[in-house]
Amino acid sequence: MSSQTKYIFVTGGVSSSLGKGIIAASLAKLLQAQGYKATIQKLDPYINVDPGTLNPYEHGECYVTNDGAETDLDLGHYERFLNVPTSQANNITTGRIYQSVIGKERKGEYLGKTVQVIPHITDEIKQNIKFLASENKYDIIITEIGGTVGDIESLPYIEALRQLRWEMGEENLIVIHLTLIPYLSAARELKTKPTQHSVKTLMESGVQADILVCRTEHELSQGIREKLARFCNVNSDCVIQSVDVNTIYDVPNYMFREGLDKVVLKKLKLDYNEPDLKSWNIFLDRYKNPKGSVKIGLIGKYIELQDSYKSILESFIHAGAVNEVGVEVFPVHSEHINRENVEEKLGSFDGILVAPGFGERGVEGKIESIKYVRNNKIPFFGICYGMQMAVIEYSRNILKLTDANSTEVNPHTKNPVIDLMENQKNITNKGGTMRLGAWQCNLVKKTLCHSVYGSDKIKERHRHRYELNNKYLEQLEKNGLIASGINKETNLVEAIELKDHPWFVGVQYHPEYQSTVSSPHPLFVSFIKAAKNNNK
Ligand code: GLN
């Protein structure tokens, strides 16, 4: 194997939402399954420094890495497919690039020069791309450029790519262009013209695509493949079709059958070995052939949008496969739940997950839901805000602190059972200032959490400002809500559970960020098992 790190760029053409992230993750999986060490990096052309300040409606879930970076949800796919942690270095935004360049300019680092897009912004981009290679951890780095070719915003990235390819040579850097081949039903024909144009647009910036991955609703005939190859200037074995499949987890096998990994390795002059997808396929087989099913109610306020709770939904898939059941998730809008309709809304579910969230909207519906599942012994899993709501519910209804609340919702409550810690109180900037990233947590012996994890110490990722107020802990514990996970350094409660309930767990952290195909998260696995036992 060559010691030079090889680069694969993935660009998108014709339309957004074609799934560059899934193609990149699937290719990386195939390379990993042949023994290559691969990682993926996402370049996002927006000016936000990170997606942490973006509403989920804008950009879906914000994914958090171990080092506390708030990143694009595609990094979640990379981790779930590869089971290798990512970090801040795996997600670069235009905002971050400019912030760094402007910071250097203020320090005088450009020595009186006029600071310009070329070379300063493009140099900064190139440096960030090459940074991942500097640790010598990877044989191959796949870099996904967000957006669609032709967008004004992505031009500096395409220019950086052009320069890098020139510097590194064609054997060390290749370009995969993901494109759409639309089907015109009136003409009963697949159309190649939009792809020809987008490849041409890329060429106007000096970048020739090496491989086309063509999203299509119908199989590409040999004729269409040859036409695409001829007009787009690629070899005919480099026209890879990607017909819609039932699940994203099918894409690695699909790309394998289409030979994407083979042409990639040939172009990069690396050896090809048959990828070992045995354990991946065992998972797929279990996922596709469940022996039963469970119904889970997902209570949140961004339920219209699949992407808002991406990692939670994927964690259910992993946990369902382990339990050999299909997990049917029914999103329920927390704003639509009240005391009168809670039974009708939630009564048929085998388990309830109350989702993370921010702000006042929908909070009372979450609290009503938790009261219902606590009284009716329905398995309950509360994540972050969901855990905080469980503490509020218990305080109101069992401790009889009727105005108990989080100061996020009611800053004037007499019983702030969830409150800001001192070190959060003076923070005014919203971006990157929450409690973020992986924190250690000690699990208390003889608790459900301890037995589920089978370990005394765990590390889980956080993304929140508010915490369980320790002033109320003794009172809560005396009345049956116990802290099963504690951060030893800060004494903060990281996990709670109820003694007198078949499965009632709330966690201040986000376990969903760590669930992967090869390492499904134990809490999700156990929760689905409990739901299975409660099957209606
Ligand atoms: N809004 C809560 C906090 O900031 C919970 C955040 C979350 O659910 N991720 O503490």
Image (cartoon, rainbow, N blue to C red):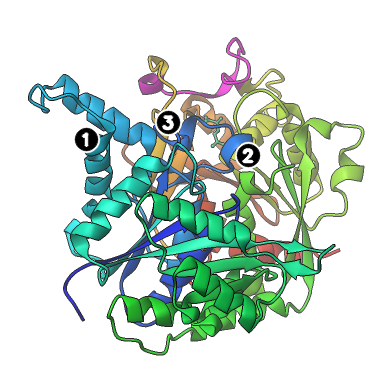
Disc sitting over residue 47 in the figure: 3
Instruction: Tell me how far mark 1 sits from mark 2, CA to CA.
Output: 45 Å
Residue 384: horizontal and vertical position, in percent? 56, 39
Q: Residues within 10 Å of mark 2 (few under 14, many from 20)?
A: many
Residue occupying the far left of the picture: 111
Image depth: mark 1 or mark 2 in front? 1
Q: Is residue 76 visible?
A: no
Pointer 3 or 1: first along the chain: 3
Magenta-tinted stretch: 406-424
**In this view of the protein, which residue sits in the foreground, 285 or 178?**
178
Residue in the image at 26% along x and 59% along y: 165
| Percent coordinates x, y for residue 187 in the rendering | 81, 65
**Could you say which quadrant of the image residue 221 lies in?**
bottom right
Circle 2 or circle 3, nearest the eye: 3
Labels 1 and 2: the sequence-earlier one: 1
Q: CA distance from mark 2 to mark 3?
A: 31 Å
Q: Earlier in the sequence, mark 2 or mark 3?
A: 3
Q: Which residue is mark 2?
A: 386
> In the rendered image, which residue does mark 1 sit on?
120
Measure how far apart labels 3 and 1 are at the Cα level: 17 Å
Q: Nearer the viewer, residue 461 or 158?
A: 158
